[in-house]
Every structure is written in structure tokens, then in C-alpha cells.
Amino acid sequence: MIELLYMGEKMKKLSIGLIIILMSFVVGCTSLPNAANRNHTLLIGQVVLEARGMPASYVSINGTHKVGIEITIQNVESGRTYSVLSQNEGLFTFTDIPEGNYIMSKLYFKRTSGNAWRDIWTEPRRNQFRIQEGYVNNVGIISWHSEDSRSLFNANKEYEQVRNFYQERFRSSNWNEKEWRNTSIGL
């Protein structure tokens, strides 16, 4: 009986610890550091994956996906890469990326179920764009359509929709006070 009480107490502590870790993760995913000075830079956009006709063995990847898409950009001059995961409604942000010319070098999505997984990725590459220091560089909404393992992209240039979504969700962010620049990606 004492051993069962001891195990119950351990499980309670483990459960509380797990809840604290999960809450930290959720809070971390929904916050964005403020711009500390006028030279800080933000690259922002939204991404949506529409997957159709993808073969599924154990895990299906078909459907609409917004969260958990990995976006990788690469500096054209230095070759340095930067990656982030999309969050709620496909929102993605890169903070303090050096000014320069970039390409979106990779989009990647993975879905897991138990030990099984299915992923999809592509390298768009023909999409040079410029990040300017000290601005919020808004690339709008990127639509990634994948059907039967072929990918097509569209930069919807819906800049206002991304800006409005961000400003509603992060009302107190000082990124809202910075100048926003529409940044066209040649997709």
C-alpha cells in the first residue's frame, strides 16, 4: 500500500512537470521577441500546403496543412541557410536575418503516427527576394500545392491579410510600429 502511494506521488509530480513543459512550449510558440532597436529585421509570411493524390502506406499526408511546415531560406551571396517552422494559421517569422538577397531553398512537411511517418519536401529555388534591414519584410501567403508528388507554388501576395492576422494576434508587439515592406517572391 505504501509503495502504491509512493508511485502515485511520483506520477503526480511527473504529470505536473509535463504540464509545465507543455505550457512553456505553447507560450513559446505563440510569442515573438520584440524588436530591440530600429535596425532589427523581421521576415514574415504564411504558408499553406494542399497535398492530394499522395500515396499513403501507414500515414496519409493528403489534405490541407498550415502548422509544422519547415521553411528554409538561403542567402544567395554567402550560402548560409535559416529555417523555421510555421505556427498557427501557417504564420512563419524569421528575426534578425542579415540584409541581402535570398531564395526559398526548401519547404518540408512531416506527419507521424506512432512509429510510422510520411514526409514531403521540395526545393523551389527560382524565387529570389530581398530582405531589407530595419523593416518588417512581408512575403504574403505562399500556397504550396502537391499532387502525385509534383509541386507547384504560388506567392499570393496577400500582404494585407498577413499583416492584419499578425496585428490582431500580437497587438502589443512593437513590430507593428515598424515600417512594413511588401516583399515579392518570384514563385
Image (cartoon, rainbow, N blue to C red):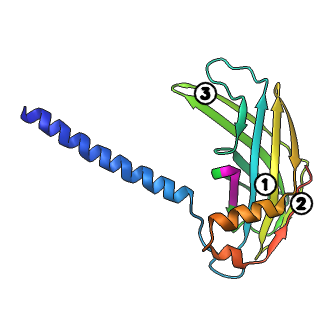
Give yes or no for contact between labels 1 and 3 (Cβ–Cβ under 8 Å). Answer: no
Residue lying furthest bottom: 38
Q: In which quadrant is the N terminus drawn?
A: top left
What is the C-alpha distance between the residues marked 1 and 2? Answer: 16 Å
> Which label belongs to residue 74?
1
Q: Is residue 14 visible?
A: yes
Tell me the crowding category of disc 3: few under 14, some 14 to 19, or many 20 or more residues within 10 angstroms, Cα based: some
What is the C-alpha distance between the residues marked 1 and 3? Answer: 27 Å
Q: Residue at x 78, y 54 (%)?
A: 74
> Which label belongs to residue 180?
none
Magenta highlight on residue 116: no
Disc 3 marks a residue whose amino acid type is Trp
> Which label belongs to residue 184?
2
**Residue 181 picture location, percent across and down:** 83, 70
| Residue denoted by label 3 | 117
Lower position in the chain sequence, tag 1 or tag 3: 1
Q: Residue at x 87, y 51 (%)?
A: 155
Q: Residue at x 83, y 66 (%)?
A: 100
Lower position in the chain sequence, tag 3 or tag 2: 3
- Picture layout, residue 6 above or below residue 148: below
Say what secondary structure mark 2 lies in.
loop
